[in-house]
Amino acid sequence: MSIYAKVAKNTLTQIIGKVVSTLLGLVAIAMITRYLGPDGFGKYTTITTFLAFFAVIADLGLTLVTAQMLSNPAYNENEVLNNLFGLRLLSAVFFISLAPIIVLFSPYDNTIKLGVLICSTAFFFPALNQVLVGLFQKKLSMGRDVLAELASRLILIIVVILSLSFKLGLNGILIATVASAAVNFLIHYILACHFIIIKPEFNWLIWKEIINKSWPLAITIILNLIYLRADTLILSIYKSSSDVGLYGAAYRVIDVLTTIPFMFAGIILPILTSAWLQKNKEYFKNVLQKSFDFMAILAIPLIIGSQLLARPVMKFVAGSGFSDSGNILKFLIIAVAAIFLGTIFSHAVIALNKQKKLIWFYVFTSISSLVAYFIFIPKYSYYGAASVTIYSEVAIAIFSAICVYKYSNFKPNLKVFFKALISALIMGTFICLVPAYDQNKLGGLLLIILLGIVAYSLSLYLFGAICAKDIETIFKKDRGGHEISYDPNSNH
């Protein structure tokens, strides 16, 4: 099977799996929000966000380094992967164990402190998963990742239903989260052993090389965490749990949407890395341009559509008590668009091995965002938090694009971007013509969304913004007609 066919199959599998997984995730969130209400969901959001800080720090940049190193034939695959797994195991145990201790000294009530203790394990398992996902990406076998995720979502729904039946409250929901994470890791591990036996190894020479590559990413990830998640924690200090719940519900939708660019970029990263290492600069730029176009085509209609449908969408996702989350979503969706485009550039920076150059950009964005959160959240609540989040994501996207231009001389062509914008405006006009009362019924809302997608897709086609050959050129051949030498079955 050609590399094009493998990548195409891998991508299609992920897309289908992600759609099903997202639907299952939305079912789980719908049950949780309706059961806990804004106040209880606010506590749930505070607990998971607090733990996310420690889980992200525990990453140490190893997730992206895994894909980068496994794409380089100079490294022994088994040796690198097992040492990455060992380093990740150590970092996860150390950092995530700190969370239940540090929360004891926080101003949070005992409900949140107990919740952090119960839920901490749920963040330990995904920390180990990411190294295994890197292996699946390299092998172009992301169907295994999809299978694990689907199984874990089903477990989440089942245990949530049991928690509701036995009226276990917030703690029952947290236990469901732990059960889901444990199943996810177990299936990942079993399926990864099909390729190699995964076991933690502790070779200091390899660890030193891994750390040398990962420390710039670790710093940028921590700084990224500050401007991405500090908003929820600061909001939880200044405002009520209900405010946090409304903001958290909108953010759940954002988290679902942002899996798309990271999933796509995870597939593209090994291809970009291989192309750059082989000095196929034209192919590198071609892949980057098509990836930018693809992300623009996905991101722009989200902004337009959300301005018109955010409130009814949040009502059906989280319940009538969360209708006000729709207004928050209208703000946050702009940050999502920046993430879609910025993720492509930030992964291109990694392919260029220039991640150290971004550190000062992240320092500036993190410090300025943190200051802005403390200024605007006390005064404007979740709207202040959302506005600063938009600023931070736009800034990072611009900084990443500048870095890519500096070291690869790549400057995106905006022709498809503007065609997508015009098509999205046509879609928005079409949605406005549909009677508003239909939006308040689930069947009517789904029909409006479906018709909007059709109108947008047709407009893209008529404007010549989409073409099957464009997608094929991302994966198949460079300008000279030579297929990129990227062997997913290599053990070196």
Image (spheres, grey):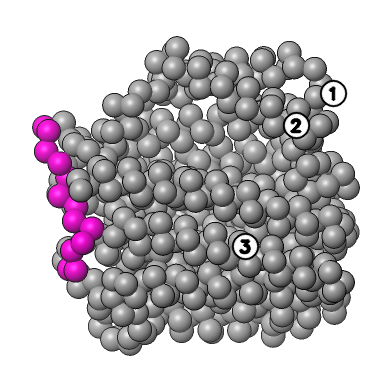
Q: Residue at x 76, y 83 (%)?
A: 104
Q: Earlier in the sequence, mark 2 or mark 3?
A: 3
Q: Does the stretch in magenta take in 275?
A: no
Residue position marked by numbered label 1 in the rendering: 437
Regarding mark 3 in the picture, which secondary structure is present there?
A: helix
Residue position marked by numbered label 3 in the rendering: 154
Q: Earlier in the sequence, mark 1 or mark 3?
A: 3
Regarding mark 2 in the picture, which secondary structure is present there?
A: helix
Numbered circles on residues, count: 3
Residue 250 % position (x, y): 73, 47
Disc marking residue 245: none
Relative to 69, say whether 193 is above or below.
below
Q: Residues within 10 Å of mark 1 (few under 14, many from 20)?
A: few
Relative to 458, say whether 4 is above or below.
below
Range covered by the magenta-colored residues: 480-492
Residue position marked by numbered label 2 in the rendering: 443
Q: Does the stretch in magenta take in 486?
A: yes
On the question of residue 354 being in view, the answer is no
Quadrant assignment for the C terminus: bottom left
Main structural element of the magenta stretch: helix, strand or loop?
A: loop
